[in-house]
């Protein structure tokens, strides 16, 4: 679908050659929570430098599958890694110099596809072999949801909660209306 905007589609962790290598390690290798968080932020830094910031400087829209909110949800809440350390890494990695002072790069909009973990597991079954996160028990995902809830409460104007239990067409319509309501289409 063409909406008359130049678009860069990307994902995290990933989006660059280096970040994709780090993604493979994060999703498949056993490691402690700090190592996992450091690799995610290393991938993010390369991704910001190589893809996201150049695209934004060209006036493109960047649509990224996951960003820092996911890191807080999965590594912070799911894995129980220290939130203050994650906040420090967020500021360290995502600080962008600007004419009116530095700022921490955040999405203009985070679409939170809210779906019961049991439904998500059923949808995933047979689609592919689950990575180490997708293979976690339901209790892990309850913690992840808490992480998203906290991020949403801290910055509610940046979040749109999409009820993802619906059909693909209904979810798409919800996403489309959310973007239209913000005046972006």
Image (cartoon, rainbow, N blue to C red):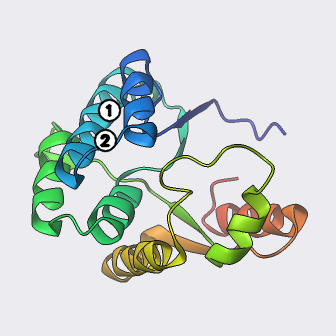
The residue that appears at 44% across and 56% down in the rendered structure is 108
- Residue 48 appears in which quarter of the rendering? top left
The answer to whether marks 1 and 2 mark residues whose Cβ atoms lie closer than 8 Å is yes
Q: Position of residue 104 (x, y in %)?
A: 21, 50
* Residue pointed to by mark 1: 43
Q: Position of residue 24 (x, y in %)?
A: 45, 30
Q: Position of residue 178 (x, y in %)?
A: 67, 68
- Residue 173 appears in which quarter of the rendering? bottom right
The residue that appears at 50% across and 60% down in the rendered structure is 109
The residue closer to the viewer here, 121 or 145, is 121
The residue closer to the viewer here, 136 or 94, is 136
In the rendered image, the quadrant that contains the N terminus is: top right
Position of 102 compared to 142: left or right?
Answer: left
Residue 31 drawn above or below residue 21:
below
Q: Position of residue 143 (x, y in %)?
A: 40, 78
Task: Residue 115: tell me if it is visible.
Answer: no
Indicate the secondary structure of the residue bearing disc 2.
Answer: helix
* Residue pointed to by mark 2: 40
């Amino acid at each position: 679908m063409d909406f008359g905007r130049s678009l860069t589609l990307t994902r995290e962790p990933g989006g660059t050659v280096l970040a994709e290598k780090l993604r493979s390690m994060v999703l498949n290798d056993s490691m402690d929570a700090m190592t996992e968080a450091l690799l995610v932020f290393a991938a993010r830094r390369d991704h910001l430098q190589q893809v996201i910031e150049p695209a934004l400087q060209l006036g493109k829209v960047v649509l990224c599958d996951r960003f820092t909110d996911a890191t807080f949800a999965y590594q912070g809440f799911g894995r129980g890694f220290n939130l203050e350390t994650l906040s420090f890494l967020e500021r360290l990695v995502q600080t962008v110099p600007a004419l009116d002072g530095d700022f921490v790069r955040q999405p203009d909009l985070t679409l939170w596809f809210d779906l019961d973990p049991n439904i998500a597991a059923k949808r995933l079954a047979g689609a592919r072999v689950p990575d180490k996160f997708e293979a976690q028990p339901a209790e892990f995902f309850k913690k992840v949801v808490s992480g998203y809830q906290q991020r949403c409460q801290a910055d509610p104007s940046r979040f749109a909660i999409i009820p993802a239990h619906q059909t693909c067409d209904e979810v798409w319509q919800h996403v489309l209306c959310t973007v239209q309501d913000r005046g972006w289409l």
